[in-house]
């Protein structure tokens, strides 16, 4: 599963093979539509409006693309903006170093404001501008042979790490009770931090339901799957839950207090070629599937 947050309420999600969706800026949505993505491998949505995408082409090769959105910035911020883009280029250059398609499929990315980034491709890691506490942990772990398997970078030097030995580390500022959930969790295979605390609650609730197929598969594999939201609500999906049935979807969403997101997307009047997200009214790009039911 791939799910990074981006700036201005944007996000990208791929909960199953061949299915993906981006909601956010119309220029970026158009660029995603033009990429002819067969299957995304990894993605980074930079706060400056850029995005980097590792994708599987229709010939099954893995390509790296870096899209730079044209934007107006104050002259006082120009130097920092140019430096951030230079650092993102070094991130994608690191990924391009490996020509092995199978290794490229094992890639994890995370970025934050100012050109700070982390990347892992296979068992090789590279990074720039990590929060000091995280950098200290990475250097400390190097002597043990453990490396960051997945890193998510958030606000105010917040971060969370899943290490190659399956242990966790985190420093969180402003993310509610997430630290408690991580402390109590038996097993974690993915952590995502939003870059906007104010927006993360509603966005996370709604986006979580697009992972219905993924959660259903987890339930069948592990016996049950649990979605715990940051307002304390918990949804348990059992192996017998059928998220493909409209009545079941409606019932689950009512528990979450949100409207049904499934079905063919509406079309924006201002951008007729781009579907529009029902929740945020942002332009979207997506895979050919118009329904996300499992």
Image (spheres, rainbow, N blue to C red):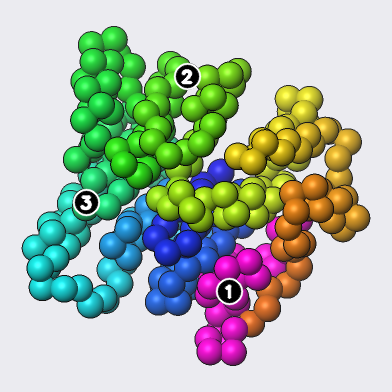
Q: Do residues under tags 2 and 3 come within 8 Å of each other at their CB atoms?
A: no
Q: Main secondary structure of the magenta part?
A: loop
Neighbor class of circle 3 (other Cα within 10 Å; few <14, some 14-19, many 20+) is many
Describe residue 209's horizontal placement relative to residue 121 as left or right.
Answer: right
Of residue 11 and residue 184, the one placed in the foreground of this image is: 184
Q: Dot 2: what SS?
A: loop
Give coordinates of residue 289: x percent, y percent. 68, 65
Q: Earlier in the sequence, mark 2 or mark 1?
A: 2
Residue that mark 2 sits on: 166
Neighbor class of circle 2 (other Cα within 10 Å; few <14, some 14-19, many 20+) is some
Q: Earlier in the sequence, mark 1 or mark 3?
A: 3
Identified at 22% across, 51% down, the residue is: 115
Identified at 55% across, 79% down, the residue is: 274
Rounded to the nearest angstrom, the CA distance separating label 1 from label 3 is 28 Å
Of residue 135 and residue 211, the one placed in the foreground of this image is: 135
For marks 1 and 3, give the one nearer the viewer: 1
Identified at 48% across, 62% down, the residue is: 9
Residues in magenta, as a range: 268-294
Report if residue 59 is visible in the image. Answer: no
Rounded to the nearest angstrom, the CA distance separating label 2 from label 1 is 38 Å
* Outermost top residue: 144
Residue that mark 1 sits on: 281
Describe residue 111's horizontal placement relative to residue 129 as left or right.
Answer: right
Q: Earlier in the sequence, mark 2 or mark 3?
A: 3
Q: Do residues under tags 2 and 1 come within 8 Å of each other at their CB atoms?
A: no
Res 273 → quadrant: bottom right
Describe residue 287's horizontal placement relative to residue 158 as left or right.
Answer: right
Q: Is residue 24 magenta?
A: no
Residue that mark 3 sits on: 115
């Amino acid at each position: 599963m791939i799910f990074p947050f981006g700036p201005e309420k944007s996000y990208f999600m791929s909960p199953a093979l061949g299915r993906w969706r981006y909601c956010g800026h119309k220029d970026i949505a158009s660029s995603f539509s033009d990429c002819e993505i067969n299957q995304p491998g990894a993605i980074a949505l930079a706060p400056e409006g850029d995005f980097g995408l590792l994708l599987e082409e229709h010939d099954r090769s893995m390509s790296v693309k870096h899209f730079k959105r044209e934007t107006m910035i104050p002259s006082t911020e120009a130097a920092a903006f140019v430096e951030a883009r230079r650092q993102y280029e070094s991130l994608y250059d690191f990924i391009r170093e490996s020509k092995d398609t199978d290794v490229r499929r094992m890639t994890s990315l995370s970025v934050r404001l100012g050109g700070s980034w982390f990347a892992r491709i296979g068992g090789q890691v590279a990074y720039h501008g990590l929060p000091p506490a995280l950098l200290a942990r990475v250097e400390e772990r190097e002597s043990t042979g453990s490396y960051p398997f997945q890193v998510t970078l958030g606000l105010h030097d917040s971060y969370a790490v899943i290490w190659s030995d399956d242990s966790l580390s985190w420093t969180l500022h402003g993310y509610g009770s997430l630290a408690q959930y991580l402390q109590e969790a038996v097993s974690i295979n993915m952590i995502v931090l939003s870059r906007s605390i104010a927006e993360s609650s509603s966005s996370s609730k709604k986006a979580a339901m697009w992972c219905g197929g993924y959660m259903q598969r987890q339930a069948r594999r592990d016996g049950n799957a649990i979605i715990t939201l940051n307002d304390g609500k918990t949804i348990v999906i059992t192996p017998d839950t059928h998220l493909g049935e409209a009545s079941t979807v409606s019932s689950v969403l009512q528990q979450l207090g949100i409207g049904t997101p499934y079905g063919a997307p509406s079309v924006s009047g201002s951008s007729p070629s781009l579907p529009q997200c029902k929740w945020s009214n942002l332009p979207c790009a997506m895979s050919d599937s118009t329904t996300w039911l499992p």
